[in-house]
Image (spheres, rainbow, N blue to C red):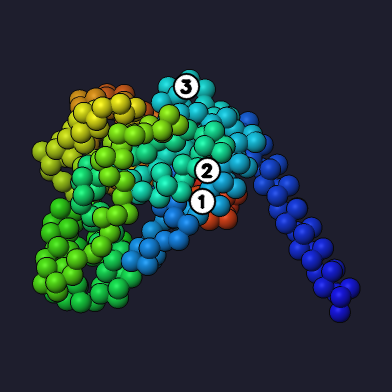
Amino acid sequence: MLGTQSGGRLTEWLIVKLDLEKERAYLQDLSRRTGLVLLYHGLFGRVPSDLEQGLHNVSPEALYQQLEAIGRFFRFVTIDEYCLSADRVGLATVTSDDGYRCVIEEGLPVFEALDVPAALFVNRAFVSGGVFWRDKVRFLINRDLVQAFEQEHGQGLVRASGQGFYRYTKDFRNNSRQVETALDRFFTDHDIQPDLKQAYVSQGELVGHHPLLCFGSHTVSHYVLASLSAEEQAHQIEDNLGFLRSQNGLTVTDVLSVPFGERQDYNCATVALAAEIGHSVLLLSEGRLEDSTNQGSTKLKVIDRVMPRGNSLMATLKKAEHKAAGSSY
């Protein structure tokens, strides 16, 4: 029995070793062909129960493993250095969207340990004490309240065939501001107050920023920009960038992280307004490795990102490479 157990442990060790060797060989090859922009959201060691279903989260331990592996073959740079570089092959940069406090409390020690700069794209509405409307959606899912919401307040929302609640509430055909209003009415009707404000970095915490961190705009409220009028988009884009620039001592990038970050989530008005307001780059989240193109006469760079999941770094990157090979901008 002992011999069998020892043999089993040896087999497991060999499998892990072979997997690591394959990952390193793949990353080395990839670093000779492309640049890499990573996107994270939650970096909770333990995800709050009201956000558990639906939140993209990578534990600090997994984050360390991913960045350490990538850093063996890619050179980590700031988001601005990456975007301005004429040749991004072999460069990597880290971004985080939505402004969860855990990125600073649990993610920053990892960035410090590996000397990796990171760009945090935040929303004024949550930094100033509000609750992220997508977390309100996740709250309903985790509290098993979706059916009740749909019966009472969901009749007016567009829902394509096969779309679940999480997906159709962020469909560009549904005005995000109106979706949030419906969510808030449901909470008021049922005397529910989601206790989530502590999940986000506060405005006061932005002042004491770390030299490895810079901050960027993710719009005021993280609404789907394509669901809004041009006037509403202008408010979302301009007010958030102005807010960040008004914070003393902050290192602020003029890169704009597009909420949700897929092609249907923004439009020509978004591009024109972003350029007019002072942005130079749009960051997307479509999970492709190809990293830049131009948008019409505005000449805004558009850079895509990949979103690692837990322990599946190589699988994520291979999928991103496959998507890049099978599509064009």
User: From mark 1 to mark 2, how far is it between C-alphas?
Assistant: 7 Å
Query: What label does residue 85 carry, if any?
Result: 3
Q: Quick check: marks 1 and 2 in contact, CB under 8 Å?
A: yes
Residue, disc 2: 110
Give the secondary structure at mark 3: loop
User: Is residue 275 among what the camera can see?
Assistant: no
Residue placed furthest toward the bottom: 1
* Along the line of sight, the residue nearer the viewer: 232 or 116: 116
Residue, disc 1: 60
Q: Label 3: few (<14), some or many (≥20) within 10 Å? A: few
Nearer the camera: disc 1 or disc 3 = 1
Quarter of the view holding residue 133: bottom left
Horizontal relation, residue 280 to residue 58: left or right: left
Give the secondary structure at mark 1: helix
User: From mark 1 to mark 3, how far is it between C-alphas?
Assistant: 29 Å
Give the secondary structure at mark 2: helix
Q: Where's residue 303, x and y in %?
A: 40, 34
Q: Label 1: few (<14), some or many (≥20) within 10 Å? A: many
Which residue appears at 51% of the width and 51% of the height?
60
The image shows residue 119, relative to residue 149, as above or below, that is above
Which residue appears at 61% of the width and 41% of the height?
68
Query: Which quarter of the rendered picture does the N terminus lie within?
Result: bottom right
Q: Earlier in the sequence, mark 1 or mark 2?
A: 1
Question: Callout 1, which amino acid?
Answer: Pro
Question: Callout 3, which amino acid?
Answer: Ser
Nearer the camera: disc 3 or disc 2 = 2
User: Is residue 301 among what the camera can see?
Assistant: yes
Q: Where's residue 128, x and y in %?
A: 21, 45
Q: Earlier in the sequence, mark 1 or mark 3?
A: 1
Query: Which quarter of the rendered picture does the C terminus lie within?
Result: top left
Q: Where's residue 207, x and y in %?
A: 30, 34
